[in-house]
Amino acid sequence: MSARTANLAIAADLPSVRRRPSRETAWVEIGQRAPQMGATMARYLDQLAVSARPGTVDAADLALRQFAQCLNVTDPGCRAMAQVERAHFEHYKRWLAKRPGRRGTLSPSTISVRLGLLRTFFERIIEWDYDDAPARVPIFAGDFPERDDSLPKFLDDPTAARFMAALATDPNPRRRLMVELLARTGMRSGELSGLTDDAMVLIGDTHWLRIPVGKLHNDRYVPLHPHLAELITNYRLTRTPTSGRLVERNDGAPFERRAIQRYVAAIGKLAGIGHVYPHQLRHTLATQAINRGMSIEAIAALLGHRSLKMTLTYARITDTTIAEEYFRVTAAVEAGQPAPAGKAMNTLADDHRRLLGNGHCNRPAILGCEHESICERCGFFETGTEFVPVLIRQRDHATDHHQPDRAQLFTGLLDNLDKTT
């Protein structure tokens, strides 16, 4: 078998990786036009499939085929990844920005994901010493579009109360249990469909629910509200499981996300509050918890977040210090109270730095702080060369304990110090 025939055979095998049809260029076309390029992409996807989730492989598959399609249009003579230069990628960026999306063209988030998948591809084939690899990664940080930092959409307290009241009247015990589990534990739809029949356990006097490995490759136990424990117990008495799952379709198959979405949307419609989706219930639980004083660390454990940065999104929704200061000042203005004599306008610039274990906190004392255990991720955190030994020890500790997010945090702090010294 010739090298060309072997490359075509490898590329032709790739459609088996994808589970859904696509309108993009097929692997057979790529293999026929640029066999070396197709073989390199196929080899990478084959390796990716060993360690990544099928959804991740599918996304990388699509991104690579689109890039190959764009190369065919802009430079038909480019037939290997080693020939890819910066100019090819600049053409691809413009091409991708014009691609149709759900609302006109592709969103910045979708474009960022596609570019990220491509950059990872280039980084890995270079790192893995592929013969067919470019001299450098043609994608830089500035290529990624600025993404909106939107707050999570949640139900406010009165709306959430209406939703739960409507849910309590649902005559379908399975549907009610499923939606109650989403609302009271904050689990994801995929985690709900993967619950095993023995997921509820009694530890001491408290019932706990074991949520299986899901989106972030981790499983966890969450405490169960007594009402949920009762619903689970009563539901299990009324059905005979066939698959070993806690909830399953009538044919024994797991529930798909769309079916779960329909269940949640039906309750929202019944409550008269418009469209509600499953992840909105997760956001609602997190918002309610943080507004009532639950610690960031506890919320992160409840939701299964890998880093506190994910959980801190909810801390931005309400800030009691800002609210208290705002209403205090508003009341003073409405009452006609004059400003205190000699009050400086730059109060926040006064010396307020506080020494931490590996740096200083520059947060103005007047603002207060409820997140004392996450200082290094805070915008007010400042460190210096005198803390290098401590930062190195913390980075090494995180590395030794397989905590990549923490290790990356301290590595970044050390790198920034190197740049400023």
Image (cartoon, rainbow, N blue to C red):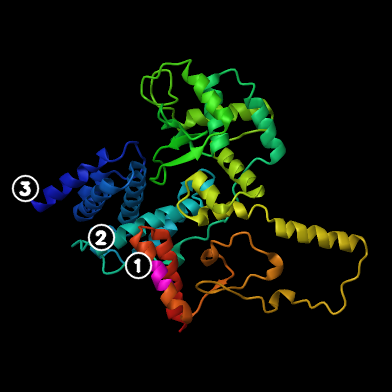
**How many numbered markers are drawn?**
3
Mark 1 or mark 2, which is nearer to you?
Answer: 2
Q: CA distance from mark 3 to mark 1?
A: 34 Å
In the foreground, 349 or 116: 349
Query: Residue 304 at x, y = what percent?
Result: 47, 46
Q: Residue furthest front?
A: 204
The relative height of residue 71 versus residue 23 in the rendered view (above or below) is below
Please state which of the two labelled residues, at mark 3 or mark 2, is closer to the viewer. Answer: 2
Q: Tell me which numbered mark, 3 or 1, is placed earlier along the sequence.
A: 3
3D distance between C-alphas at marks 3 and 2: 25 Å
Main secondary structure type of the part rendered in magenta? helix
Tell me the residue that label 1 is attached to.
86
Inspect the image, locate mark 1, and give the three-letter code of the amino acid beneath it: Arg
Q: Which residue bears the numbered disc 2?
A: 125
Which comes before the other along the chain, label 3 or label 2? 3
- Is 67 within the magenta? no
Q: Is residue 262 visible?
A: no
Q: Which residues are magenta?
A: 391-396
At x 70% / y 78%, what residue is drawn? 350
Q: Is residue 104 left or right of residue 168?
A: left
The kind of secondary structure element at disc 1 is: helix
- Label 2 sits on what residue type? Ile
| Residue identifier under label 3 | 1
Kind of residue at badge 3: Met
Left or right position of 70 against 293: left
* Place of residue 330 in the rendered image (x, y in percent of width and height, measured from the top left): 84, 60
| 392 falls in the magenta region | yes
